[in-house]
Each structure stands twice: as structure tokens, then as C-alpha cells.
Image: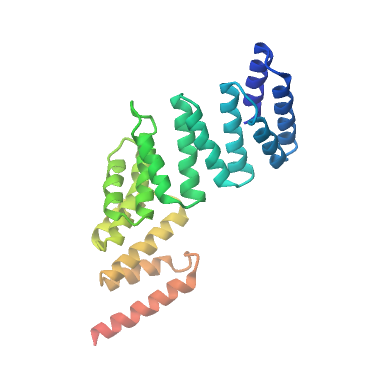
Amino acid sequence: MKNNLFFLLLLILTSCGFSSNYYGEILRAQEYIDNRDYKKAAEIYENTLQQKLPKVINIKIHYQLAEIYSIYLADFKKAIKYYSQLSEISNEASWHIKSYEKMGLIYQNNLKDYKKALFVYSKLLEFKPELKNKVYYQYRLSENLLLLGKYKESLKNFLVVLNSNDKKLANESLYFIGLNHFYLRDWDEANKNWFSYLKTETRQDKVQKTKFLIANSFENNEKLREAYNMYYSLLGNYPNNEVIKKRLESLYNRRVARKR
């Protein structure tokens, strides 16, 4: 992060004859970054922004501050502030895209502000010509719709991802399509998509999580034998074995009661 910024600024400052004050402040900030004193580096950069700076330097310092606050200081609201200002300062689409991508991740993963994340990914999908990561933005938008409880809208958007050329995201979308159907109480469709998802998923934590949901869906659909068998397949492998034992006991008692 630091080297590209440092050499670019150094080249601009020395070749264009700008005040050495800028150069000195930037050098000091970089030294603090070298020593992992990110708080002090951010303070210097913020003070530097109070001066009249060339536009290209202003843009780069805003990006550096946003990165420092998001990556090293975990001050995500300040990171959003500088990413947002960056998109306002620059007229270049590349900076807008980069700042929106960063804001989308922070809003969704760190601040859990799914409405704002949804807005950001909607903006990225509106770019013309279409951006190369369009399917990824569609995937992220669909996730946030799901997190906001807008299951039908989320399902519609995940189906777009499913029918895309991105095989990895298409398979990942099967899990979420199943989850949307689950929340919509469409148990058969939920399991249909989850079984398809399991055909290619290899991560055991995801496999176990999905099998648990399949068993739960069978249980909700009163398919007690299928639910019992699926829970039983998780016995000894699921992170919380006691939960599986309790589910099995409950299902056994229900099946016995049903036969009486």
C-alpha cells in the first residue's frame, strides 16, 4: 500500500516543484507506517489534508486514510468517510468503483448496515458499460436482500447469479436460494437446491451446516424418517454433538408417538 503512494507522490512533488512541506509530511506519515504507528500516520495525513493540495495528492491521501482506518485501526465509520469523500473528489470511474467496492464490504461485513450495502452494490450494478465484476455485485446485492428479510427479491437476484457464467458464484448461490426457500417455508425447493449445492461443495464446515438445514427442513415438512437419517449422518461430525443428540431423541419420540 505505502510504496506505490510514496513513489507517486515523490515523483509529483519533486517534478512539479510543490512546497517541500507536503513532501516532508508525507515522508513522516510513511515513517510512522513503517513503524506500525498507524494512528499517528493517520493524524499526519489528516492534518496534511487541511492544506491546499494538488488533486491527485488529495485523492491518494484520502485512499491511504481510508485503508489505514479500515485495515489497521478498525475504525470503519472513518474509513467510510474517506472512501465516500474519495468518490466525490475524483471524476475517474476507477476511483468510484474502488471506493464503492470497499464501502460495500465494510457496510455488510463490519457495520452490518445491510441497507447501505444494498445501495452501494445497486450503484455498482448501474455502471455503464457493465463492469467485469457485475455477477459478484449481483451476488452481494442478493446476500443483503436476504439479510434484510426480502426473501422473494433475494431469490430473484440469486437466480440471475445461478444462470451466470461464474460457476463458483453460481454454485454458492444454490445455498442461498435454498435458504430463501427455507425462510419462505418451501421445504421441498429448499432441499432440492441444497442437495444440488452439496454435489460440488467440499468444505466440511459448509457441508455439515447445509446437512443440518436439510434435516431441519425435512423435520418442518413432517418427513421424520428423512430428518432422522440426515441428523444421524452428522452424529460425531457436527460441531455441537449435543444438539444432534437432542434432535435425534425428539424425532425418535415423535415417530414412536405417530405409530401408536
Residue drawn where x is 36% and y is 43% of the image: 139
Front residue (pair 85, 177): 85
Q: Residue furthest bottom?
A: 260
Q: Which residue corresponds to the image point at 44% horizontal and 31% vertical from the top-left?
A: 97
Question: What residue is drawn where x is 46% and y is 24%?
Answer: 91
Compare residues 184 and 175 and report the one nearer the observer: 184
Q: Please tell me which residue is depicted at 74% across the width and 35% down the height of the picture.
A: 32
- Residue 233 place in picture, x, y as percent: 40, 66
| Res. 168 visible in picture | no
Quarter of the picture holding the C terminus: bottom left
The answer to whether 20 appears left or right of 124 in the picture is right
Is 69 displayed left or right of 108 in the figure? right
User: Where is 244 relative to 30, above or below?
Assistant: below
Image coordinates of residue 55 in percent, x first then y, are: 56, 22
Relative to the observer, which residue lies in front, 80 or 157? 80
Q: Name the quadrant of the N terminus.
A: top right
> Between 229 and 152, which is closer to the camera in this rendering?
152
Residue 77 in sight in this render:
yes
